């Protein structure tokens, strides 16, 4: 039978854990607020930039210059990039992203790039025979040196797909697949933006040069935006996970309190029974 001392120890342990989790929750909230405004503002800028790019691309195609390939490379190679994390307590968002990533890799067999230590563990567990390239990446921000290393590797591929979490609302973070190069990107942007290329533009020095600059810059810009989006989604998911943990701990505290009251009532009843029993024995001895 559990003792009063054990109940007290369990209650104090849960209370300490609750305080610790609340501190982590506050830190996650501060980090999320720090990056949220910048990410959402950058998202709007990115959409506008891609619309301009599609207009440039449309103008380039209208000029029909077959001898000049606009793409950086046409080797047909594709790579899938999984943006994971280095630590836990991010809720289920990382697992959801990997579910989509795993399904794509099994079906299409692309080259694979993993960002974050959790991704390495997931690959070992669920895709143990798949070779991949790993890049260490911070959960706290986009380190430019690491970013450049990853970009140098990715630009050798014609098609690049990034798997990451995207912030929708505080209660909703969704796994997202973002093509940042190749025809898939062009088709997706054309449908999303509805750019039909009806207008004519003048380009200086040439539409080809402008399009090449746009393509190179947008590749890096879209990938960096995906990394920032991933951080925001992970912080929001961590807040939800920690908030759920606080709720569960509070339920545990209530259960411990109930057990404590039951034990107190049991001890009180036992004392009353012993008192009544003692009175009965005393009356028997006295012959009452």
Image (tube, grey):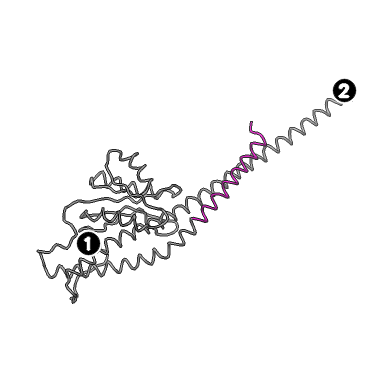
Task: Give the secondary structure at mark 2.
Answer: helix
Residue shown at 26%/61% (left/top)? Answer: 219
In the image, farthest residue toward the front: 145
The image quarter in which residue 234 lies: bottom left
Q: CA distance from mark 1 to mark 2?
A: 101 Å
The image quarter in which residue 211 lies: bottom left
Q: Quadrant of the C terminus?
A: top right
Check residue 230 for magenta coloring. Answer: no
Give the residue number, with chain letter if any, for mark 1. Answer: 186
Q: Are marks 1 and 2 in contact (CB under 8 Å)?
A: no
Eyeballing the image, is 226 above or below 275? below
Towards the viewer: 100 or 273: 100
Q: Main secondary structure of the magenta part?
A: helix
Magenta segment: 1-27
Q: Quadrant of the N terminus?
A: top right
Give the residue number, with chain letter if any, for mark 2. Answer: 285
Towards the viewer: 102 or 148: 148
């Amino acid at each position: 039978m559990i003792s009063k001392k054990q109940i007290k120890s369990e209650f104090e342990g849960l209370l300490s854990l609750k305080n610790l989790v609340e501190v982590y929750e506050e830190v996650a909230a501060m980090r999320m607020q720090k990056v949220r405004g910048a990410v959402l503002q950058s998202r709007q800028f990115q959409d506008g930039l891609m619309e301009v790019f599609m207009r440039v691309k449309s103008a380039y195609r209208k000029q029909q210059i077959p001898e000049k390939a606009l793409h950086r490379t046409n080797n047909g190679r594709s790579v899938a990039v999984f943006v994971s994390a280095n630590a836990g307590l991010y809720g289920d968002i990382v697992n959801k992203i990997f579910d989509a990533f795993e399904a794509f890799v099994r079906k299409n067999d692309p080259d694979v790039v993993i960002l974050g230590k959790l991704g390495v563990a997931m690959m070992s567990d669920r895709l143990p025979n798949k070779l991949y390239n790993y890049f260490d990446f911070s959960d706290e921000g986009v380190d430019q040196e690491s970013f450049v290393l990853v970009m140098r590797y990715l630009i050798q591929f014609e098609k690049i797909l990034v798997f990451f979490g995207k912030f929708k609302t505080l209660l909703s973070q969704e796994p997202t697949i973002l093509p940042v190069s190749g025809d898939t990107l062009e088709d997706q942007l054309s449908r999303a933006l509805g750019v039909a290329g009806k207008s004519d533009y003048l380009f200086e020095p040439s539409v080809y040069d402008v399009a090449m600059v746009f393509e190179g810059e947008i590749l890096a810009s879209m990938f960096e935006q995906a990394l920032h989006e991933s951080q925001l989604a992970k912080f929001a998911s961590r807040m939800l996970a920690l908030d759920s943990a606080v709720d569960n701990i509070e339920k545990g505290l209530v259960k411990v309190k109930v057990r404590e009251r039951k034990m107190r009532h049991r001890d009180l009843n036992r004392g009353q029974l012993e008192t009544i029993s003692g009175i009965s024995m005393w009356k028997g001895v006295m012959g009452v």
